[in-house]
Amino acid sequence: MKNLILMFLLITFCMLFITSGLAQNKYVGVKQCSMCHKSDKQGKQFDIWQKSKHAEAYKVLASDKANEIAKKQGLKKPAAESPECLECHTVTADAKLLDKGLDVKDGVQCESCHGAGSAYKTMAVMKDQAKAIAAGLTSFKDEKEIEAKCVTCHNKKSPTFKEFKFPDMWAKIKHPIPKS
């Protein structure tokens, strides 16, 4: 009887461990998002992102100027390898949560703001906003919430910070789905 209980506990523990690992969404990368967010129906959201400075955010870190700034900040690694820089210039997460399709060199991607997309990336889920949110999509109720997200990076913590005028900057990256 003891062995049976022990085996039951072991199986239960394994199942909990496996399902908890599956429950964490993975970051899939902008290429996954772009498949559906290129169309006129979706407001050409991918095109808006692709033409933005967010798409170039990682590339900025590879410059001599960025490395000079990193050095002045006392960072031990080049800017493109420093967690202090990467946290605002690309998708950052535990390596186990980065899907093989995600390329950090794609900069500040969809999931940087909208959350890891592995559980909400399918058409069936994305067609129902409540389902998408339940599956991990971060959706913003209003521009105050959007601004709060933006200033987690666009703030005085950045060594290159200049005044952040949210209405002006939001106008450059805003990407609503057109109303039908």
Image (cartoon, grey):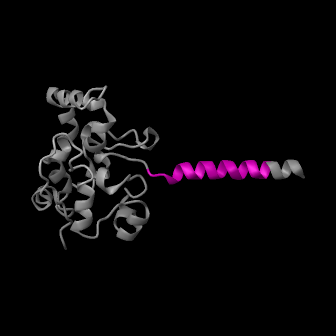
Residue 166: name its quadrant.
bottom left
Front residue of 178/60: it is 60
> Please, what is the dominant secondary structure of the magenta stretch?
helix
Residue drawn at x 16%, y 51% as measured from the top left: 47
Front residue of 18/163: it is 163
Left or right, 177 with respect to 27, comes to left
Front residue of 35/27: it is 27
User: At which x and y percent is residue 97?
Assistant: 44, 44
Q: Outermost residue toward the right? A: 1
User: At which x and y percent is residue 63?
Assistant: 16, 29
Left or right, 80 with respect to 14, comes to left
User: At which x and y percent is residue 129?
Assistant: 35, 69
Q: Outermost residue toward the left? A: 168
Residue 178: name its quadrant.
bottom left
Q: Is residue 134 above or below residue 5?
A: below
Question: Does the image show residue 128?
Answer: no
Please provide the residue range marked out in magenta: 7-25
User: At which x and y percent is residue 88?
Assistant: 27, 44
Q: Is residue 8 above or below residue 59?
A: below
Residue drawn at x 38%, y 53% as measured from the top left: 117
Residue drawn at x 41%, y 42% as measured from the top left: 99
Q: For the C terminus, which image quadrant?
A: bottom left
Q: Is residue 49 magenta?
A: no
Question: Does the image show residue 56?
Answer: yes
